[in-house]
Structures are given as structure tokens and as C-alpha cells.
Amino acid sequence: MFRTALRNVLAHKARLLMTVLAVMLGVAFVSGTLVFTDTFGNAYKNKSAKSFDHVSVAVLSGGGSDEDEKKEKPRLTDALLKKAAALPGADSAIGSVSGFTALADKDGKLVGGEWGTTGANYFPGKGGKDPRYDFTDGAAPKSAGEIALDSRTADRTGYRVGDTVRLSTDGPVRTAKVSGVFDTDEGSVVAGGSLVLFDNKTAFKALNKTQYDEIDVKAAGGTSEAALERSVEKILPEDHPTMTGGELKAQQDSMIEEQTSSMSQVLLIFAGIALFVGIFIIANTFTMLVAQRTKELALMRAVGASRRQVTRSVLIEALLVGMVAAVTGFALGIGVAVGLESLMNSAGASLPDGPLVIAPTTIVVALLIGVVVTMLAAWLPGRRAAKIPPVAAMNSVHATPTMRGLVVRNTIGSIIVALGALMLFMDDNYVKSGGAGVMLVGVIVLTPLLSRPFIAASAPLLKPFGVTGKLSRLNSVRNPRRTASTAAALMIGLTLITAMTVVATSMSSAINKMAAGSMKADYSVSMANFQPLAPEVREKLDKLPDVAATTPLRQAYGEADGGFTTISGVDPKTFGSLVGMDFIGGSVDGLKAGDALIDDKLAKDQGLKAGDTFPLKFDDDSKTVKVKVAGVYEGNEMLSGVFAATSVVDPHLTKVVDKQVLVKMEDGASDKAEDAIVKALGENPAITVQDKDAISNAVAGAINMMLNMLYGLLAMAVLIAVLGVINTLAMSVFERKHEIGMLRAIGLDRAKVKQMVRLEAVIISLFGAVLGLGLGLFMGWVAGGTISNSVSTYTMEIPLGRIVVFLGIAALVGVLAAMWPARSAAKLNPLMAIKSE
Amino acid sequence: MYGQGETQVVALDHVSVDFGQGEFTAIMGPSGSGKSTLMHCVAGLDSFSSGSVRLGETELSTLKDKQLTKLRRDKIGFIFQAFNLLPTLTALENITLPMDIAGRKPDKKWLEQVIEMVGLSGRLGHRPTELSGGQQQRVAVARALASQPEIIFGDEPTGNLDSRSGAEVLGFLRNSVRDLGQTVVMVTHDPVAASYADRVIFLADGRIVDEMLRPSAEGVLDRMKHFDAKGRTS
């Protein structure tokens, strides 16, 4: 049996090519993901393990919020550090502080985005050196006028030792000279962030610290971490948190593992989709191979092979194909992993170096997946092969699959679609997303049924192609099952792509609408990392000649009439001209000191309307204040809660600071106006000045990046579907050799033969694309229903431009997929028709 | 029509033959005699290394594939042993296929006449799978006749048919020559089929060895036996 199977596989090498490629790509995706994430995680772990070299015991800052700490006496002081370093069994101790530090690049722009730059202290420990940092150039900072930069940031910005840089932590911009450039294994830098080092004293001042964030004690030779921890605990108040270096490393490792495993899970979902698409191609190929060998298989049955033996012979072939595909796919996957790493590095991600990690489980999983998927897909064709009656050996014509037998399939498909649709209209979100999947499966089952009307409908479009158009249309419905599964493979990818595009476009425009509707100001000024702004910022802006109005936004929390809410402090005189609100009752004009605006939800929940008075209780445990409702507005994600005058809010803030300042210019937003604001604020890299477009672009940009990533991940599924189209056409051409030969004999020229094959490919591709687009739009609509519950301005938008592009790509895919089959069809000799079988 | 071949492979060797207009010619010979090769060359289906084939004023050997295809489309009709109809098209669509390919409108009166002659009037909407072998070959005959080609080539047109259906098909071919002035060349190994022709050419080992006018089945059979015996002795 095995020998026959092997011989069959070898005989059909060319026809199995696409199948092998499809499985190979799927397996490569899986093994590439596993190898890449393992390698990445391992390298990351090794690298960050080094950053714990100097830590045997870490004394952490006490739990609780910053507020609590400020009230207590600082514990992690120099005195404690010295005491710890002098402990028996301790070798040395260093203290560290860190915090947000905005570094300006040579153009004055913030380096490393809003969260990327950290500032920390250089702690001259034993021998005056900080073991965490290796200086490659220059020396450590020694005074307030000096800083050091990590080497990658130095490379990126072009700063060198001796250059003067501008930076800002909390307050005004300061300038400093670069005293040195260093390498480090510090976690944030390994992860791609920037690090600025101050000397110890300056770090405390600049980062606004009263004590160390952490004191790390290193054990002397012969002292265990646990023993040192016990003696460190003795000099600390009871219950003060400490951790050993081993514990810190374990914590870090498990965090890295969590991150890499969630990354690999996401990638594996897409690999799974790609493999699922591959199943259609495998099934198509084996169905064809069985159909072509009907006589042979019938003969085997006639001479005494059992049904099970026939099925088994098909499955052994699948096993061989799967093994070849899995092994090559695995090898390709390793290549993908290596390629991905260098691709990400060249894109600026700077992944840590490390040896390639190929876990034994990866090998097993990759090989098993390849083989199992192939055999699973070949199982149904194998069963069908077993059903061939021995008498078929005597018949000269084997029955081609027709619409008969599809009745059962259509019934099952309809039931599944109905079930899926039902689930889509349930309230539970899990049931809903399950319904989307169920419906997709149902439509896949129904594709043969749908293929007829769709392809019939394409007739008018094919009219200009004359007789070749007609022939390709008729050819494409000849084997509805095969056409359907080829199209379904393409449909799956396009359904997901379309649904995601719909949601992303609708979301972007919802955010635009929200920003445009609620912001009447020209600029929003805030800190880069959303830390508070000093009130002086607004005062400076008010002094600018072109500024028409400003308001601060200060934030507090509390209870309005018993309901929890945010309370925003604003300038009641200018607020109305800077923020747009839709009022249900009252208006912004009524807002005076002692009044408040509340959102519709709060009004409904607490039964309040304009003119009512309600008790407002701040969360600082002070007495409640009575405020009058000046207006009730429609809340959304940008505007919600209570808005009151700063005079109401300020007494309840621990420190009067602005979350944001809104600015309106006399002549609207312009580059000149923006420059004036940036200049007035001292060109501080920590302060972000955004106009309306910048605010919505920031969100839209993030959505777009996500969408592009999803496109990239789904591209593999589409690519495999394209292989399926090639496969189907190659089969069609092979099966219709005689027909094509006859057509050539009676006068169809080569170009027309090519056109005929090409059009068939385009018809199948467009069928898949139209189904996918339709289903994707439907799913986008369903998902939109859920989203609009939480995002009030969300309405479904059909991305017409993209849809046209997708259709164009589908047609192009058809043309490209047909290239090779069309060439081999055109090469067929007319004599083929005359040769009897 | 005039043909001459001189090839390295001894498929056809110094064959010189012409097919007169309005004549029904049968080419006979044992397997491997070169009768099919001769027809393929003459019909523009196969290329030949030297020699010349002329259809009317057109010299085939100088034609490129595209022109050759056009020639086959417009001037030549084919009838194959395996019928070779498109299963997706109806009988009528199969008949008009060569004209559809050319983008020509079929001559309606002529078409009706042809369909009437082969007796397919009631079956035009059927697909090939719904027709018997004889009916399918009648569709093929109608397809060859419908475009009014200068010459029709038949490659064992009765090879897959029972004798009654075969006789019908041959009758149509003879009638089309006699009544419509069609030129027909047919390759066959069946002496009965050959007896429908006006002239029989005998081929052996790539050469024309004999010719017979107004043949009868018995006469052809005798002649064949004679060649077979000769072939065996030589």
C-alpha cells in the first residue's frame, strides 16, 4: 500500500506542488512564530538578567501612593543606604531614582515619544563607579550642568560628548553638556527606550524625589541572598518590602514570558487562519486526484481491496505530502524567524542579540500540524474514493460531480447560517463573536449554491469578451464544489480584512467627529506624558498678543448627588468659547462660579435638571458644597462628568495644577501661532502643543497602524488562497486538455485560450472577493452595533475606496494566478483533441 | 489542394496528392502508414520540416501559428473520432462555436438547412451528455458544415459509432459533397466507411501506394488485404 502511495505521489509531483506550498507556508508561519518568540524571549531574559548582577537584595520603596509617601518620613535615605552597605555580608549598596525626562533632539523635538525617555541617577558606589553603566565615551556626569546618554540614543540623535542638550523633567527647560555615553543592560533601554543620567544630587532635584526609589545591596562573597535579606530586614521597619535578586529575576522572567506568549498567541491565530485556508486547497487537490484515478481505484476494489484500504491509500499519500510540506515549512519558518528579527531591527526596534532557540516542542508542533492538517483535509476525498463502486472500473466515463448531492449540503449550510445570524443578535459579546464565526462557516458550506447565481450575474460583464467570456463563465460553474472552495479560501481572508477595515474607518471618523464637535479651541497644551502643567503655563499663554481665550482643565474626583464622577475645574468665563457641548437643558452661558454643568447620564441617574441644586462631595473628605445645575449636556468619551469653576475645584486639589490648557487664537490655528506658543513656553520638549488635527491624527494613526499590521498578518491567508486559485486553474486546464485542443483546432488562437483561462480565474477570484466583502461588511455592521454602545459618535462607514481597491486586487490576483495555467493551456497542441484517451 | 512532404523521420516521404473541390476523398492505410500525419499536415494542425501544402492560393508552410489558427477557423472544418463537443454548450451553441469564435453571425438559412439535413431540429437545446453517440457526431458534422469551410477533415469520424449511426454520419458527408458541393477528406481504416467516398488513397510506410475511384467496400477490403500481405512479406 505504501509503495503504491509513494509512487502516486511521485507521479503527481507537479500537481501536488501548490498543495505542498500551501501547507509549507502555513507550517512556516507557525514554526517561524514559535522560533521567533522563543529566541526573542530568551535573548531578552538573558540580557535583563545581567541588570540584576549588582542586586542581591533590593529594598523597595514602601507600598502605597505617592501622596502617602510624602506624608511619611522618607525611609530610603542615604543613611539607610550606608547602613545597609556596612552590614556584615554586604559588599556594596547603590540607590536609584528614575522618572520622566524629556530630551530634545537637535530639532527641538521630543526624543523617543511620550513615554520613551527616562532620567535616572548615576550612583557613584564602590570605587566611585556605578556598576550598571559602562561608559564607552567620556565620563559620568558630576554636576548639575552635565548628563550622560545611552549609546543608542546618542547614535539616534547624533549627540556626542561635549554637545549641549536641552531637556526638561518637570519644570522649566534646562541645558546640560553631554559628559559621557554609556552602554547598559537596564530593562527600559533593552526594551528600546532612552536613558538620561544625572549626577546623584541633580537627579533628586530634577526628578522631584525625597528618597531613593530602590536600594540594591550586593552580597559579599560567601553570603547567600537569603542570609543578606534577613540582615537587611533587621535594619528596616517591619513589613517593609524587600526582594532578593533571584526573586526580581524570576519576576522579570515571568513578565517577559507573559509578553512573548501573548505575542505568539496573536501570531498563531493568524497562522491558524492561514492553515485553515490551506485546507481548501488540499481538499481540492485530493478530490481531483481521486476523481482522475476513479478507474484505478475501482480496479483495486474489483480485485479485492476493502473500502478502508482505499481510504488508507489516499491518507498515506496525504501523509507523505504533509511530511514533505511540514519539513520544508519548518526550515522556511526558521528562515522567517531570522528574517523577522533583522527586519524589526532595521525598522529600529533593536532586539537583543541571542542564539536561535529551536525548542523540541516547536519541531514536534510544526511537523504534527503539517501532517495532521493535510491528512484531515484529505480525509473526505479519501472517504469519497472508498465509495467508488468496483463497477466503475468498466465504465469509460466517470461521473463528474454535479449539483446532485448538494441538497444535503445546502440544507446544512442554511441551518448553520441561520444559527450564526441568530447568535449575532444575542446580547452577549462572546456569543456574538462566536456567531460571526458560525456564520462564516455556514457561508463556506453554502458557496457552491451561491456560485451559480453569482456567476450567472457576471454574464453581462463578460459580454465584451465574446465567446471566450461565455466559455470561461460556463467553465467556472462546471465543478461548483471546487470553484466554491477556491473562492471560499479567498473569502475568509477578505471577510476579516473588510470587517476590520469597516470598524477601523468608522472608529477613526467617530473620533474625528468627537474632536471636531467638542473642541472649539485651536490648541491643546499638555505635558508629553500627561503629567500636570504648572498654572504659570496658562498665565504665559494669556500674555501672548494673538491669544483670544484660554481655560485650564483641572481634575478632581468626587460624588455628585451620590453618583461617582470626575469634576473638572475650568474658567467659566472662557469655557463656552473653547469647548463645544450639546445642551439638553440650560446652557453654558449660565455657568457662573458656584454653578456646574453635568452630563446627561449623570442627570438621568440622579434625576437632575437645569436649575436644580445638588450636593457635590470631593474625595478629599471635605464638606460637601451645594452647586446649581447651569446646564445638562450630552456626554461622550472626551467630555463627561461635572464641569465647575476653578474656584469651586481648587480648594480640593492637593496641588493646583492643570491637566491641560485650551487655547483659542484671534486668527485661528496656523504654523505661526503654534510657533509663538512653543516659543512662549520656552521650547520645552516636555510640553505638547496639539491642534485639532493632531489630536485626531494621533488616534487615527494608532488605529491605522493596527489595521496595517492586521493586513500584514492576513496577507499570508490571502497568499495561500491565491495558490488555491492557481491550483484550481491548473487542474481545470489539465482536465480540459482535449477540449482546449479541439478549440485550438477549430480556430481559437493562443491569445484567446489564455484569455479564457484568465477570465475563469478572475471570475473565481471576484466571486470570493464579493462574498468576502459582503460578509465582511455585515460583520463590520454587527461589530459596530456593539461599539456604538460605548462610543456615542460611532456610525458605520463603508470604506468605498478601500472596497474598490480590494476588488481591483482580487481581479489582479485572478490575472496573476492564471499566468502559469494560462501559459500551459496556450501551449497545448491542437492534436491533443484528436488523440483518443 | 496539393501536398508534398519530405521528412527526416519517415512519417511522410515524397507524398504528392491533391484533393479536388467538391470531392469526397478517403485516406486509408494500416496503422503507422502515415495517414493521420498526412491529414494533420494538410489541415494545418501539425508542422512539417520541408515540402509545401496549399489551400487554394494560401501556402500553409509560411504561416505563423496565429494565421494558421485563423485559416483553420475560417476555411477548415473538423470532425473528430471522439466527437469533441463542449459539454457546457448546447447542441446549437456547439454548432455555431467556430463562427462565435470568429465573431461572425451564422448564415441563418444555411444553418437551418444543415440542421435539417442532420436531423437535429428537435434536439438543439440539449447538451452533449443528453445525446447519444450518433447524435453527438451529427452535431459535430453540423458544426463542420455550418461555417461553410473550403474543406472538411474527418479523423475516423465513425470510429466510436455503431454501424447504423456510422452509416448515417457518412451519408450526411456524402450528401454534403453531392448536394452542397462540399470538399471532404476523411481518414479511416474501415473499408465500409471508405466506400462512401468518391476516391480512396492508400498509404503505406509514408508513401502513397495506390488509389481507387468509386470504391466499393469489397474492393477496398481486397486491396487492403493485398497490402497487408505485401507488408508482411517485405
Image: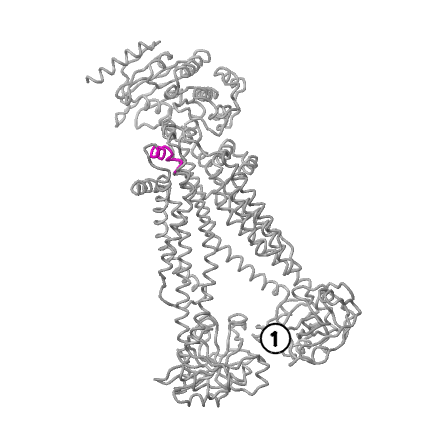
The structure residue drawn at horizontal position 56% and vertical position 60%, both measured from the top left corner, is A703
Residue extent of the magenta highlight: A290-301
Question: Which of the chains bears the disc numbered 1?
Answer: A
Q: Residue furthest left?
A: B233
Q: Answer with the quarter of the image where residue A226 lies.
A: bottom left
Total residue callouts: 1
Q: Quadrant of the N terminus of chain A?
A: top left
Query: Does residue B148 show up?
Result: no
Residue type at mark 1: give it. Lys
Q: In the rendered image of this protein, does residue A561 appear above or below residue A333?
A: below
Q: Is residue B168 left or right of residue A698?
A: left
Q: Which residue is mark 1?
A: A679
Residue A656: percent from the left, percent from the top?
Answer: 66, 80
Residue A21: x %, y % from top left: 39, 48
Question: Viewer-proximal residue, A151 or B137?
Answer: B137
Q: Is residue A234 magenta?
A: no
Q: Which one is in front, A770 or A368?
A: A368
Give the x, y percent position of residue A171.
59, 80
